Amino acid sequence: MKPNAFTLLEMLLVLSISLAMISLTIFPLTNSLSVFNEKLLLEEMKASIYYAQLYAITSSQDTTISFTPTDNKLSASTVNNTLFTVPLSPIIKLNQKKVENFRFSSLDGSINRFTTIHFTGTSKNYKLIFQIGKGRFRFEKD
């Protein structure tokens, strides 16, 4: 036997410590990925709503955005065409009972009504609050 060699017991000890450290790192990483995906989808929804509002102003056509709970999606359209569809599942679920429609005015981008849309994510609950006046809206965590 060589005097400078590692024994089998020493190698197993090093491997078990390495495996424990790797497993402690990977499992929290999967939770972080789901939280990151939620935030990313919320930002995509926000950008899509801004796009629908800008499209209404620049094209001089009223734009309608719809939250459909049966399909769990956000979509925007004008009288002539569909602008986009953002599927929300499986990351976020709409908690509404009925389809919610909002219309952005072609004159100044203001919204036709105000309400709150509730969402359930994997880690938190969210609210999308539409306010009267110039089409303002914001996301909040419950």
Image: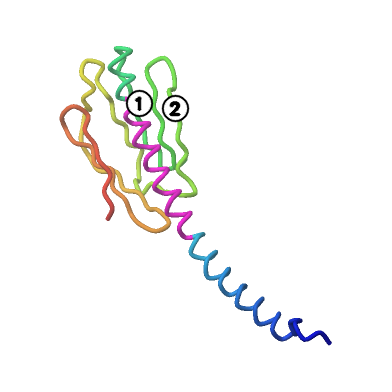
Q: Identity of the amino acid at label 1? A: Tyr
Q: Quadrant of the C terminus?
A: bottom left
Residue 20 picture quarter:
bottom right
**Along the polypeptide, which appears first: circle 1 or circle 2?**
1
Which secondary structure class fits the magenta region best? helix
Q: Residue at x 34, y 36 (%)?
A: 46
Residue 82, percent from left and from top: 44, 22
Residue 59, percent from left and from top: 33, 12
Q: Identity of the amino acid at label 2? A: Phe
Left-right relation of 24 to 55: right
Tags 1 and 2 touching, CB below 8 Å: yes
The magenta segment is: 31-52
Q: Residue at x 60, y 77 (%)?
A: 17
Q: Nearer the viewer, residue 37 or 72?
A: 37
Report, in whole angstroms, how far the alpha carbon at label 1 lies from the one at label 2: 10 Å
Return the mark for residue 51.
Answer: 1
Q: Is residue 32 in the magenta section?
A: yes
Q: Quadrant of the N terminus?
A: bottom right
Callout 1: 10 Å neighbours few (<14), some, many (20+)?
Answer: some
